Amino acid sequence: MVFEIYEDEDLEPDQVILRNKYKEAELNGNLFNIAPFWATKIDEIEDYSFSGFSDNRSYCEVVVSDLYYISDFIGLSLPMFDKNWPSESRYISTLERWSMKLPVDPPSISQILNDKVHLVDGRHRMILAYVLKAETMIVSVPNKLIPALSEMISVKVLQK
């Protein structure tokens, strides 16, 4: 199956191949064969500034659907393939890593405002975990927000 390239896009051939691969997998229901794999070891983390290895943050396990419904995605929404390559490429690069069993940094919560969780990093990864129907996921949470988050959803602290 071949998907069109939109007039405003200047994609490299490998980007078109990856887009087609995952759009087709989504259409055929094959995305569900991919499972999220979160980087939680110091040598796996790419962005230390938001990681659970910071003295003031912890890795926590949460139920994906619970976090999804209380998150503010700041304008980001489904469908994943929405003719916006910068956004699509974030989903695709994560899917590509997960399909090779490579970890990605967990999403990082920055604040809770008006009963909504705000992610400073990882909105696409959060949505992708939801789309893939993952039961639980790892997130990096500021220690001071763990009590408030625990009042909203079930939170299991994995590492402080």
Image: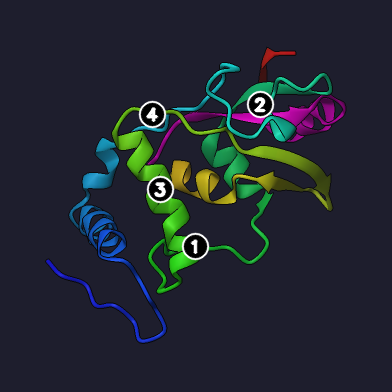
Location of mark 3 (residue): 93
- Picture layout, residue 16 above or below residue 36: below
Location of mark 2 (residue): 154
Q: Secondary structure at mark 1?
A: helix
Mark 2 and mark 1: Cα distance apart in space: 29 Å
- Picture layout, residue 52 above or below residue 110: above
Residue 49: image quadrant is: top right
Dots 2 and 1: beta carbons under 8 Å? no
Give the magenta range. Answer: 132-153
- First in sequence: mark 1 vs mark 3: 1
Mark 4 and mark 3: Cα distance apart in space: 11 Å
Residue 139 is labelled as none
- The image quadrant where one finds the N terminus is bottom left
- Residue 147 magenta-highlighted: yes
Location of mark 4 (residue): 102
x, y percent for residue 38: 49, 27
Location of mark 1 (residue): 87
Mark 1 and mark 3: Cα distance apart in space: 10 Å
Q: Secondary structure at mark 4?
A: loop
Amino acid type at mark 3:
Ser
